[in-house]
Image (spheres, rainbow, N blue to C red):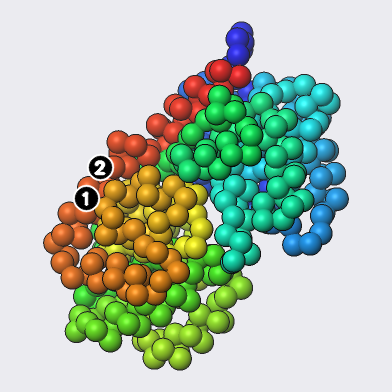
Amino acid sequence: MPSVHPLNIAMVTDSGFLCEETMYLGELKKEMNTRGIKVNLLPLMDRPWSTLEGKLSIQRFLKTAFLIPMIRNCDIVHVQFTFPMGLTLSLLKNAHGKPVIIHTHGDDVFVVQSAGIGFRRYFLGRLMTKMAWKTASRIIAVCKRAETEIWKTGVPLSKISVLYNGVNESFFRRKSLQDNKYAFVRENSEFVFLSVGGLKAVKNQVRLLTAFSLYTKGSDRKSRLVVCGSGQLGNTLHGLAHKLKITDKVVFPGKVPHNEMPYLYSVADAFILPSLHEAHPWSILEAMSCELPVAASKVGGIPETLDNEKLLINPWDVEDIHRAMRFLAEDPKRSRAIGAQNRKIVLAKFTLKRHAAQLQSIYQTM
């Protein structure tokens, strides 16, 4: 898009936490600024996007519409997630007169019907998503598999851009254990597994704890599992750990401030993410950047990031999660080598700078 002034981007989201200093949008704004692109962060709500649960929130549509006066002076509207903001601002293009990019992230693309996951599992969700993608100027998919799912709805490939997530590799790097407030998790532990994510069904921590219980019964090594996050399953998971008799081997640190996450990654020996659904999760990129070997579910864009088949998990199979844990722990030297290679993969493919450069190219075609 030809312009005589620096690009001015209205970055719209209803996930306010993404705007925090070390989080994706906070970091992206700083990086884009170094490229002469002004990013105005417009968080509508300080809570994450959520799927329809049998009702529509008219209030959310109205609040999105009220953003129009704030985006009239920008060049491009870049919306995180399809619903409700992407849909609303795409349909109202005639009112604000700006091209709209809808940046999809996962639940607005993928569906796991049996687990009740995904906005498009509803007929109304499929209808509204298709309408949003049809009227948007461009769609961003965070992985090739998401691109395929979007294309299947009738959106031409020429309208879809694949843009993998990226992390700040200078921030996410291995830290010394000295003066590390999370070093306590290594006490009396020879091997530490770490999993990061909200404590909810989609992250599959119930099967993870069950698999870890199997691992502890079959190993003489003193091991520990750190389950980082907060959410509605907190009490359930504590109760399950007690039932499985692994309470002394599982640590629940709660929600760790994002600016402290490199220290938490640095006390672990391996990272494991057995989610039922993901698109291209930042957590595995952060762990990889901190030189951790990673085992994760064979879903979404994860197989496009991890190239070791032995570290790809069937998340529905407890024994397969158990198998991956054994593989990670049985040869620490091999695991450290995998972790070092993961850091190289991030530097080559998944840095925030690379992500921003590709996003800049997308902006310049609008």
Residue 70 at x, y = what percent?
Answer: 77, 31
Residue occupying image coordinates x 75% and y 44%? 128
Q: Is residue 204 left or right of residue 296?
A: right
Can residue 88 be seen at all in this image of the molecule?
yes
136 relative to 44, above or below? above
Residue 183 at x, y = what percent?
Answer: 31, 70
Can residue 291 be seen at all in this image of the molecule?
no
Q: Secondary structure at mark 1?
A: helix
Q: Is residue 165 left or right of residue 172?
A: right
Disc 1: CA contacts within 10 A as few (<14), some (14-19) or many (>=20): some
Q: Which is more toward the observer, 149 or 24?
A: 149
Disc 2: CA contacts within 10 A as few (<14), some (14-19) or many (>=20): some
Q: Which is more toward the observer, 125 or 196?
A: 125
* Residue contact between numbered discs 2 and 1, judged by CB atoms under 8 Å: yes
Residue occupying image coordinates x 56% and y 82%? 235
Q: Report the quarter where the N terminus lies.
A: top right
Residue named by callout 1:
340
Residue named by callout 2:
344
Residue 136 at x, y = what percent?
Answer: 69, 30
274 relative to 5, above or below? below
Residue 11 at x, y = what percent?
Answer: 64, 35
Q: Secondary structure at mark 2?
A: helix
